[in-house]
Every structure is written in structure tokens, then in C-alpha cells.
Image (cartoon, rainbow, N blue to C red):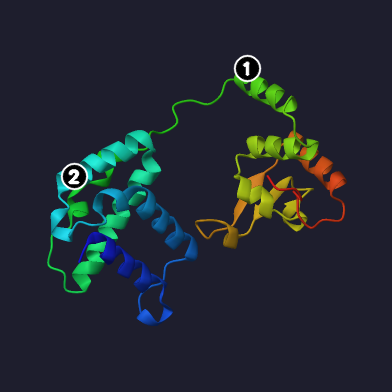
């Protein structure tokens, strides 16, 4: 069968609760379908598995890395890898080109080399004050910058998680990727921002009651 047909069968298998396979989360399946449709279907859908060579796959990933970024390149290679493994499990006797395509060869994430300077931070905060949006949203962005948390963390935060006297915000394990509770230590300015948000949303259980 073609790569496109094998991919369809892989998606069906991973979304069928009766298949006995380890199910993928809906968000993961949705992401992989998007990667297939946007990146892989065009060049590979009609090719048989033994027609997709390492050189062609490597050239595609180099182009994806250059034009779209590292994340899409990583996920495209991962999907090809999983489709070939699925086909092998169903009796397909063919080499997996993604096995030979080392992940680090095309997706090396560069570590941050420096922090923002004091002047850069001031310029960012000054620019934020001139942004045409709700004052509470500006406060929320300031809070994110001060604490280093993500948007999802702020959206999900509840007032019960804030320890005012200890100047701590305790994020429960179920909301952390590592499944471990995380404590955010709050500076004086961060506490002032939380106080302002509490004043704006006195009846809400959530720290931020507006979409970010």
C-alpha cells in the first residue's frame, strides 16, 4: 500500500479504542494529522513505502527545518517513523528511512545565550503600557514576564493556589508536564499585580478571568 494509505490505517488504529493499541490523546492525533496533511501528504502520499528513500526524506526535513522551523521537522520525522513501525507490525517488510535519519542531525535546539538586559526589560514594559488592550491583560502579561510561567498556567491559576503570606503560588501536579507540583516564588511586584487582579475580579475563582 501507499504511504498515504498506511498513514490512514495508523490513524484509525490509534483512535480505535477496540484495537488494543495504546491510544493517543486527541490533541496528539490532531497534531499528527495536521503534520501529515501540511508536510508529508504532498510528496509521499502516493508513494509505496519502499519508494521513500532516506535522501528524499532528509531533503524534505532540511527544507521543513529551514522554512517552518525545528518543531515541525521533529514531528514530521516522528510520524514517518511511527507509520513505518506500524506497517512492520502488520507484516510490511521494508526498511524504515526515518530510523537512519538522526533527530539531532536536523533539529538541534539552540540554548538561550543570554538574558534580557535591564534596558531591554524596561523597553518591553514601556511598550506593553502603550499596547491597546485591556489593563487586566497588560497586568497578566507583566505577571508572566515576572514569574516565567506560560499562558496556560496563568489561565488555569485559581486564587486558592496563591499563598499570600508565604508569597508563593503552588501549581498542582496535574497541571504540570512532569506531573509534579511546582512552587512559584512571588516577588513584591508580582504580589502587587495579583492584588490588582483580585480587585478587578473579586467574584471569580480564577486569577485571570479574561482570555489571553
Q: Name the mark nearer the viewer: 2 or 1.
A: 2
| Near-viewer residue (62 or 148) | 62
Q: Quadrant of the C terminus?
A: top right
| Residue 123 x, y percent position in the rendering | 65, 20
* Local crowd size for mark 2, using a 10 Å CA cut-off: few (<14), some (14–19), many (≥20): some
Which residue corresponds to the image point at 22% horizontal and 68% vertical from the top-left?
Answer: 87
Q: Looking at the image, which residue sits at the far bottom?
A: 18
| Residue 120 x, y percent position in the rendering | 60, 20
Name the quadrant containing residue 113. top left
Which residue corresponds to the image point at 57% horizontal and 20% vertical from the top-left?
Answer: 117
Q: Secondary structure beneath disc 1?
A: helix
| Residue 201 x, y percent position in the rendering | 84, 49
| Near-viewer residue (36 or 172) | 36
Q: Looking at the image, which residue sits at the far top?
A: 119
In the figure, 132 relative to 171: above or below? Answer: above
In the figure, 102 relative to 145: above or below? Answer: below
Which residue corresponds to the image point at 87% horizontal and 45% vertical from the top-left?
Answer: 199
Disc 2 from disc 1: Cα separation: 47 Å
* Local crowd size for mark 1, using a 10 Å CA cut-off: few (<14), some (14–19), many (≥20): few
| Residue 184 x, y percent position in the rendering | 64, 46
Mark linked to residue 21: none
Mark 2 lies on residue: 56
In the figure, 116 relative to 79: above or below? Answer: above
Mark 1 lies on residue: 119
Q: Secondary structure beneath disc 2?
A: helix
Amino acid at each position: 500500500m501507499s504511504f498515504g494509505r498506511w498513514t490512514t490505517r495508523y490513524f484509525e488504529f490509534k483512535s480505535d479504542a477496540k484495537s488494543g493499541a495504546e491510544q493517543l490523546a486527541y490533541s496528539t492525533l490532531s497534531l499528527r494529522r495536521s503534520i501529515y496533511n501540511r508536510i508529508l501528504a504532498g510528496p509521499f502520499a502516493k508513494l509505496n513505502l519502499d519508494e521513500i528513500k532516506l535522501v528524499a526524506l532528509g531533503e524534505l526535513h532540511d527544507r521543513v527545518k529551514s522554512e517552518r522551523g525545528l518543531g515541525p521537522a521533529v514531528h514530521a520525522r516522528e510520524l514517518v517513523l511511527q507509520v513505518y513501525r506500524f506497517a512492520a507490525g502488520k507484516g510490511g517488510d521494508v526498511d524504515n528511512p526515518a530510523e537512519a535519519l538522526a533527530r539531532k542531525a536536523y533539529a538541534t535546539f539552540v540554548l538561550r545565550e543570554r538574558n534580557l538586559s535591564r534596558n531591554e526589560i524596561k523597553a518591553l514594559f514601556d511598550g506593553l503600557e502603550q499596547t491597546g488592550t485591556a489593563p487586566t491583560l497588560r497586568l497578566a502579561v507583566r505577571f508572566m514576564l515576572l514569574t516565567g510561567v506560560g499562558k496556560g498556567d496563568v489561565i488555569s491559576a485559581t486564587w486558592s493556589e496563591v499563598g499570600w503570606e508565604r508569597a508563593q503560588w503552588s501549581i498542582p501536579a496535574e497541571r504540570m508536564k512532569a506531573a509534579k507540583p511546582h512552587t512559584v516564588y512571588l516577588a513584591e511586584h508580582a504580589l502587587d499585580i495579583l492584588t490588582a487582579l483580585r480587585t478587578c475580579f473579586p467574584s471569580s475563582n480564577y486569577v485571570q478571568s479574561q482570555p489571553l
